[in-house]
Structure formats: C-alpha cells, structure tokens
Image (cartoon, rainbow, N blue to C red):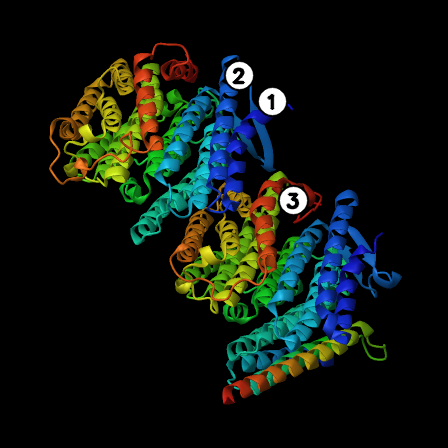
Amino acid sequence: MNSLPVWLVVLPLAAALLAVVMPARSAWIGVLAGIATFLVAIGMAWQVAETGTLIHALGGWDPGLGIALRADPLSAALLVMSTLVALASGWYATGYFTDKDQQARFWPLWLLLLSALHAMLLSADLFNLYVTLELLGLSAVALAALGGGRAAVAAALRYLTVGLIGSLAFLAGVALIYARYGSLDMLFLARVIGPEPATWLALGLMTAGLLLKSALFPLHFWLPPAHANAPAPVSAALSALVVKAAVYLMIRLWLDLFAPAVSPDLAWLLGLLGAAAVLWGSWQALRAQRLKLLAAYSTVAQLGYLFIFFPLLMALPAGAARETAFGGLVLMALTHGFAKSALFLAAGVIQQRAGHDRIEELGGTARALPVTTFTVALAGIALIGLPPSGAFLAKWQLLSSAIAVGQWLWVPVVAVGSLIAAAYVFRVLGYAFGPGEGARKALSDGREELPALLLASVATAVLGLGAAAVWQFLAPMALLPGAS
Amino acid sequence: MMPFTETLYALVGVGLFALGLRGALLRRSLLGRVLSINVCGAGVFLLLIAIAYQGPGVPPDALPHALVLTGIVVAVSATALALALGRRLREADHE
Amino acid sequence: MNMEFWLPALIVLSSLLPGLVIFLLREEQHRFRTTLNLVGAMVKLLLVGLMIWGVFHERVFETRWTLAPGLDLVLHADELSVLFVTLSTLLWLVTTVYAIGYLENTPHRSRFFGFFSLCVTATVGLALAGNLFTFVIFYEMLTLATYPLVAHKGTPEAVRGARIYLSYTLGGGMLLLVGAIWLQTIAGPLDFSQGGILGDIEGLDPAALSWIFLLLITGLGVKAALVPLHGWLPQAMVAPAPVSALLHAVAVVKAGAFGIVRIVYDVYGVEFADSLNLLLPLGVVAAVTIIYGSVRALSQDHLKKRLAYSTISQVSYIALGTAIVGPVATVGGLVHLVHQGLMKITLFFAAGNYAETLGIHKVSEMNGVGRRMPGTTLAFTIGALGMIGIPPVAGFVSKWFLGVGAIEAGAAAWIMPVLIASSLLNAAYFLPILYRAWFRDAEPGSAAMSPRKGSLETHAFLLWPPVATAALALAAGLFAAAPYSPLEWAEIIAVREYRE
C-alpha cells in the first residue's frame, strides 16, 4: 500500500474542487476530508514505523523525469500533527464563519492549503518543493485576507510580497543546483552533493528564501500583523503549520540534503538569529495589547528555539546524542504546532464572545468561558515549556546538548525566553481570572471550545507523557555527515 | 568554460534579479513592487534558460524549460492575487 | 497488579484524580466534593500506611516511566520519601477538614479544592521522586498548582502577592532546572542514592560541581525561603488560612527544604559535599536566615506575617542540619522537617481561627483571646512552646539534636550561639502573644469579647484540626523514643546516609 502518500495529497485537492462546485455543502466536505486525511496520516505513520521510509514514484515514472513522494519519519510525524491540527481547526471553523459567502470561500482555499502542505512534506524533488511552496504561500495569503478588514488585507499583501521574493530566491537556488548536478531528485542529490562554491551559493539563496518564509529574526516583520488579523482558524494554521513548513524545509536542506556542504559557522549564525528571535519575540509578546498579536509574536519566539538546535546538531558527533537532540527539535516543533493552534482557536472563541481580544479587558473570561481559559492555560504551559508538556522535554534536551558541546550562550537565552513567556502567559491568565464581564454573547454550544481543548491537551499531556514514542519513531532517520 | 552567450544570459538574469529585488524592497507603490517582483522572476527564468543551453546544434535541455513555464504560471497567478488584494485595499482606503 | 510498581503511582493518583473531577463539579455539589476530598485523603493515607509497612520490611517500591532518552520518570520509596509523604498525607487530611470549615459559603470552592488536590499531588510526587529529573517536574507543577491558591481571594492584593510568588518561584525553578540539566549532562542520569553518588563518579570537574551546587541550592532556596530569596513569603500571606497553613508546613517551603536535603545527601553525599567545601557556605546562609527571620518577626504586628517570618527562620534549621557533617546533626535537621510541619500548621490554623471567628488579625488585638477561644489558644500555646524549643513539645527534640550534632562536628563555636539566639528570639516574639492571650483581659468592645455562636468556640472543622496537630506535636516530642516515631525514622535515614 505504498500509495498512502498520494492519498494525502489527492484527498484535500479533490475535496477543494468539490467544495468549489458545491458551496452549500462545503463545510461538510471540509470536515470529512479532514477526518479522512487524519486517518490516512496515522495509517501512513504506522507503516513508516513498521517498514521504514516509504517511497512512491508518481505515475510509475522513475525519478529523474518523474516525481517521487517520500515519507520518512520526520515527514510522517509532521503530517500527523498537521492533519490533526487541520481537523480541529476545520471543525472550529464550521462554527466560526457565520457569513455563508465567507464559508464558501474559506473551504476551497483551506483544502488547497492542506493539499500543498502535505505535498511539500512528502516531496522528494527540489522543484516540487518550489511549486508546493508557492501554492502554500498563495493559499495562505488568500486565507489571511479573508477577514476583509483593511488591516488584514494590508498584512496579507505584505505577506504575499515577502513570500514571493523568498520563493524566487529559492527557485534561483534550485536552478543553480540543477546547473551543477543535472538532477532535481533529492534522493539522487543526497548522494552526490559536495562542498563547493556552486553548492554554497545555491544553499545560501535557498536559505535566504526560507528564512524569509519562516520569519526568522530579523526577517520576521511580516508575521505578527498577518497572523493577528487573520480569522482565528486561519491564524492557527498559519502559525502552527505554514511557518513550520518553511522550518521543515530548512531542516531538510541543512541536515539532510546539503549536509556535506554546510559549515558550522553558518549554523552558528542561524543559532544567533534564533536566539535574537527568542528574546525579541518574547519581549514583544509581553508588550502586546491584543491576544492574537501576543500569540503571533510568541510564534516568532518559538521558531527561534527551533533554529537554536541547528548549531547544536552540527556540533554533536553522530550517534545517540545527536539523535536525542534531533528528537528534541522535532518534539518542540510538534508541541508548538498543537499549542499555538490551540491558543489561536481559544483566542477566536474569546474574540467572538467578548467582541474584542484586548488583553487588559479580558476580565471575567474565566467565569464566562472556563473551558477556553483552561485551554489557554494548557497551551501556555506548553509555550513556556513547563512540565508535563512535550516542550519541557524538548527544552531539556536543547539545554543538555548545549552544555554537552560547550555552547553555553544558549542557556541564558533559553532560560530568559522561558521566563518572559511565563510572564506573558500569566499576564493573560491574571486578567482572565480578574473581575469583569467576560463574554457578552453567551456560548451557543460548547462545540466551539472543544477543538482548542483537544489540541492543547495533546501539546501538554499526550506529547509530554508519550514523548518517548516520538524518539523511537524518529530513530531510523540518519542525518548529517558521518551518520549514514 | 561556458560559452559567451550562455554566460551573458546568466549574468543578465542575475542582474535582473538584483534590480527587481531592489525595486521590490524600495518602491513605495504596490504596482511598482509587483512589477519589480516580476522582473525578479524574469531574471530567474533567464538564468534557467541559460542553464538549458547545451551547445550549438544540440537541442536544449527540456527540463529547465518546463521549470520556466511552471514559474511563469505561478508568477502570473501571484501577480493577479497581488493586484486583486491591492484593489481591495484601495477600496477600503476610499471608504 | 504488581504492587511494587504501582504503589507509588497510586499514591500520586489518589489526589490527582479526585482533583480533576472536583474541577468539573458545580459549586452547589459541596457534599459530593467533600466526600471526594475526604475519600481521596483516606485512600492516600491507607496507601501510605502500606508503603511504610513495606519499606520497613525492605520491600522496594518503584514506578518507572521513560519520557525521553535518558530521562526516566521515577517514583521510588526510600525512608526519606516515606517520611515526607507521611507528613504530607497526614497534614493534607487535616488541612482538608480545616479548609472545608474555613471556606464555607465562599465562592469558587470547586476551583479551590481542585487546585488544592493538585498541590498535594505535586508535593507527594516530589516526595517520592527517585531522581532529580522527576523532582524538577513535580517541583514546577507545585508552583503551577499553588499559584491559583495564593490568588484565590481575587482581590488586588491577592493578585499582586500571587504575582510576586510566581516570579520568585519560576525564577528559582529555572535555576534548579539549569543546574539539574548541567548535572545530568556531565554525570549521566542519576537516581537518588543514599549516601550520595557523585563522589563515586570519576572525572567530574569539581568547579563545575560547585557551580551546579550553587544553582541547585539557589533554585531550591527560593521555595525554602533562604535569605535573600525569601521575599515572596510574607507577600503570600494574602492567601486564605488553609493555604498558608499548607504552604508553610508541608507544601512549598518544605519542598524546598526537602530538595536541599536530597541534593546534599542523596546526590552529592554529605562527605563529598564537604570535601568540595560546599557545606560551610550553606550553613552560613542557613544561620543568617535563622537569625534574620526571627529578628524580622519581632517587629510584625500582623499575626500571619509574624508567623511567616518565623517560618523563614525555622525551616532553615533543616538546611543547617544538612550543613553540619555528622549523623546527629542530620537527625536533627531531618526530624525538624516533621516537627516544624506539625507545630507550624497548628499555629496557622489557630491564626486562621482568630481571623475567621473573631476577625482578629493583629497581635495587638489578641488580649484575652484565651478565655474566648481556649481550645485554639491551647493549641497555639503548644505550637509556640515547641517553636521556642521547650520540652516536651517536639521542637525541643530537633534543637537538641542539632546542638549536640554541632558540638560533635566541632562547629559548636558558631552554631551554638545561633541556636541559642534563635530560641531567645523565638521566645521574644511568641511569649508576648501567649501572655496577651492568657493573662490579659479582653478590652470591652473588642472582638475577643464577642459571644459564642454555638456550644463550641468556633466551627468544629476549625477547632479539631489545630487541636489534633498540637497533640501530634506534643506526642512527637513525648514519645520520640518510641518505634515508628519521626525521630526513629530520621535516625534510620541518617545512618544510611553516611558511608562509614
């Protein structure tokens, strides 16, 4: 059943087309597609755990001219996360959009975004990566502008411009790789890439493009307005999934494909930028007046943590220590995906019930919306990195690796970042438990609050207690020189 | 050593990319930025075309051409989206 | 059902599960909530009894769950964990009864008891923690569970006090975490072992170990209220009396002190720590805290604040005990863990009674209170006498052992003055209270003159807990030589911690 990867791409795509044709039923189509893709992703992950990396050549054509889809443990883990986040966010979205027109426009774009995302996570061909990157970007921009207000459209426009520049840089890099090696198939290239000027230039261009798309400091300026002004389910997907996709590509390129060619010094630069992102993003989140803006800046900070892993992974010798650190990186990405989407969905509930999301006026929310407040607390615990969230274990591994290789700089950065995160999370909770009216409109049904709660529980309980499974799942991956 | 024509095309492509990038970053009007990005794109396409060249009399490599065609399609769609959003922004500003 | 594996986990779950259910209860379901609370406490007590019996008979109880490569969650029952678990469980039961009475007819009780249960879960978890990783996890969970309790009243002062509490404890938690990670990175995953384990590992850099010690002790010292990290404790007095009682006697402050004991004895090993010259600074900080706390207590008119500073002072006896090398001093420090818990909780219960029944918050208002509330004041008296160190209340036993231990270790020159000064200061701030309560007449029109509402001086649930804990404090002192007494238990532990 090697065709499971194909289903992951085709299902949402077909559903998107169906949703265009049958707008009245689009919500149903969307949710059903979400459930189906989630089940397929689980099935595929199961298969990967049993038999190892799955490779599927589309149409039976061999890679070289044809395009291959590849599902290895990293992709499979991220796909399980994506499909679950998408399912929960989609479920929430059915209740969020009250306007029939908006609903009809939302679902095709949403399903297209998912299809592009899945295709990207499964791509084993460089040009395919470019195409899916563009698709992802375009659908994300369209979704971000869906809210309609001036702020949202302006932010979406900036997102688009930045995204296009990034993609073009990426494409230039792809072109150079083809010029030098004559192939775009990643499986083939992994064997032949070596450290030379052409490779470095290509890697530099692709990295520049991806750094723009992953909002690494100082190229993060487009993210907060875009994520804060988008509709809640869209923000959830943007922060948890779209941005993560760019980081995934960075991991793929630096640690897998271009591994023989990367230099530890450049990795240091990534780490430093990541550290700056952690501190700057956390600080701005603390100063934010609106809940969604806080969440957006928090994303900037959390992605910074992911980049700090890069110099550590380069410095660790091949073996158990590096595997442990890599597992920490993936666990951090997974936990953030769940926690951030939960936070945005909860913010959506609050915004719809209270009419606004200004933090200082959130008084009474705990009484009016206890489930949502609990969700915010759970998600916050995962963002701070306190036990029992998966992020706690990931941070432990991060700091442990940093101390082990003597890169002490990251220790105070992570410590301070976590403390500032605690400050902004508890600031929100403090206001929520304070006196006030809370929700002006009563909850029509609890259905709205459950998806967020589900996601937050995964981040803080499931991933915390079951984290060992993540490491076991990722064990077969061989990364960086010396490992294969 | 690459033949002169190929190098020229490639260099022009790089130059266009740089020019477009400068425009995209510095221009203030939306239309200017969108056009600059298209120039960027043209630069990359030119680079690809140069890569496709395999020598006099030899048919060019088809794969980069396919990449260019795909890239053009993407660029057109993206431009359309950008202009549509720009229009929406203009309407919102005039309200 | 493999008891050896499940018993520690069950003890933790016996308060976690009721707690989670309580969150979902509506405010009006108070009978169900009360039943759940008390049943959970009883079950836990039963399980702990089982554990005591088992440990006494050399059975090994351990729950182990791998969370990540090299990071195992370990719940392990050794004599020290049993000591702390028993104290926590017993005092939780008593405090639950007290809290039910204290919070009658106040809002948000489901929330309160839910977090209350989580707080005990975390305390029991860290008591049973079998390695530093597990300890850190429950330590942080304790912070998260106690914050809402401190902020419970919802007033601006409560929120502010809670925020200060949170900043201190999260900061301390971060230091502890960094220290723990550093230690594990250089020494590998270590389970707590009696007698310490770091001394046996080759090739560890003493400078690194000293820095790690500093980080760990500072992180723990925030909760243990070592000077100058004690600033949060007086602020946290805005919490309702049951919370203050629990925080001071059992949960937060004791957790910090317990952690220090674990680090010195079961990670470093007391002789190894001494060889690295780490114990002298610890002893000095403890001594300074002892004196400072008592001096500040003198000037406090607010009763709970006076007790808060008294706690700051008294808990450092435990740290002092760990800093003196010698089994007798160890016994003194360890047994004070239990004794101080019993005495201090009595004092806080009594303070809560005065506030709740008579509206008295200040020492200056306490004239004649003994006549109006004899049971409470008797309990208070026993607790206070124990604090001063007057036999036969338990506090005397701990101080005796500390003093003898200091002499044996040759550190008498500076430790004896500290102990004596501390007792004198304790007398100076407790005896006037007792004098006022018993021997001064209540001013006409003062709160102490207000009549009784029923046959008892106050609500039954508020009266019996302090009486019970006072009796226990007395019994722990009178019957210190009996088998199964805290002193006996502490002696067993102390013997195991020394190599020779």
Query: Which element carries disc 3, helix, strand or loop?
Result: helix
Name the spot of residue A305 as percent of width and height, x first.
52, 54
Q: Amino acid at mark 3?
A: Val
Location of mark 1 (residue):
C3
The chain carrying label 2 is C
Mark toward the viewer: 3 or 1: 1
Residue at the outermost top position: C482
Q: Decide: is A454 above or below A290.
A: above
Name the spot of residue A313 as percent of width and height, x first.
58, 48
Location of mark 3 (residue):
A470
Residue C54 numbered mark, or none: 2
Residue C185 numbered mark, or none: none
Q: Residues within 10 Å of mark 2 (few under 14, many from 20)?
A: some
Q: Residues within 10 Å of mark 1 (few under 14, many from 20)?
A: some
Answer left or right for A94 relative to C74.
right
Q: Residues within 10 Å of mark 3 (few under 14, many from 20)?
A: many
| Quadrant of the snapshot with the C terminus of chain A | top right
